Image (tube, grey):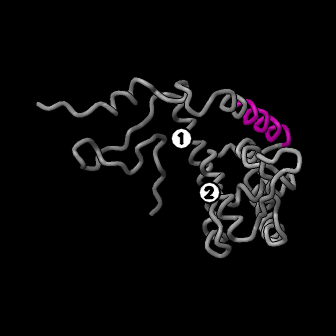
Amino acid sequence: MSMAAPDGFGVGEAGPNGAAGPEPVLDQAYPRLLYRLLKLNNLINRPFFTHFADGYDLTLNDARVLGALTAVGQAASHELCDATGMHPMNVSRSVARLVRMGRITERADPHNRRRKLLTPTAEGWALHHILAPHFKVLAEFVFATLSQREVEFLSSLIAVLSARLESVDLDSSRLIDAEALEREREPPRQG
């Protein structure tokens, strides 16, 4: 029997006393929409885990880094962070892993010795050519029920939301509830 997940965070979480209780329902549109976007992201990622992760010894972050790199041919790590929206530590780990596996190479930029240029190897390009048709089929399936106008509108909305998030630093207090975070860090009161 299939059960639809509620529109809210806390799916499958235990209540305050450790017992599973009724699932919380969000009463605000923004968090509910964010949850739906996170769920959509997970649903889009599922075929990757089912068909490619183990077979090609590839993490999702590795695939994102390799995909961004093959799109431009060569780039520095910080440019891949910008292109993917990934945290710099995750890009760094994937770059190191892809270099170790022989899927990308790293060399000093001849114009700036502190900058390292990353380039897909023949193996990296071959893997990209294996994955690209599957990515195309998935994209066509996901967007098939939308009109061209809806696709363009969705694309413009995503661009606006991405620009908003890119306009602030990762450590910005605008992205978290600073008061709640401070309360969570306080030691428990003895009593």
Q: Which of 90/19 is in front?
A: 90
**Amino acid on which disc 2 is placed:** Arg
Q: Residue pushed farthest left? A: 191
Q: Is residue 188 magenta?
A: no
Q: In the drawing, does residue 87 fall left or right of residue 63? A: left
Residue highlighted by disc 2? 93
Observer-side mark, 2 or 1, equals 2
Q: Is 160 placed above or below 105 here?
A: above
> Which residue is drawn at the image coordinates 76% and 50% (left, top)?
143
Q: Are marks 2 and 1 in contact (CB under 8 Å)?
A: no
Residue highlighted by disc 1? 35
> Which residue is drawn at the image coordinates 34% and 33% (left, top)?
184
Q: Is residue 151 magenta?
A: yes
> Helix or strand or loop: what does disc 2 sit on?
helix
Q: Quadrant of residue 97?
A: bottom right
Q: Does label 2 or label 1 sit earlier along the sequence?
A: 1
Q: Which of 134/60 is in front?
A: 60
Expressed as whole percent of the image width and height from the top left, the position of residue 6 reads 46, 45
Q: Which of 5/122 is in front?
A: 122
Q: Main secondary structure of the magenta part?
A: helix
> Helix or strand or loop: what does disc 1 sit on?
helix
Span of residues in magenta: 148-161
Q: In the drawing, does residue 72 fall left or right of residue 80? A: right
- How far is disc 2 from disc 1 in space, using C-alphas? 27 Å
Expressed as whole percent of the image width and height from the top left, the position of residue 69 reads 80, 55
Q: Quadrant of residue 85?
A: top right
Q: In the drawing, does residue 145 fall left or right of residue 33? A: right
**Amino acid on which disc 1 is placed:** Tyr
Q: Is 125 placed above or below 143 here?
A: below
Q: In the drawing, does residue 17 fall left or right of residue 127? A: left
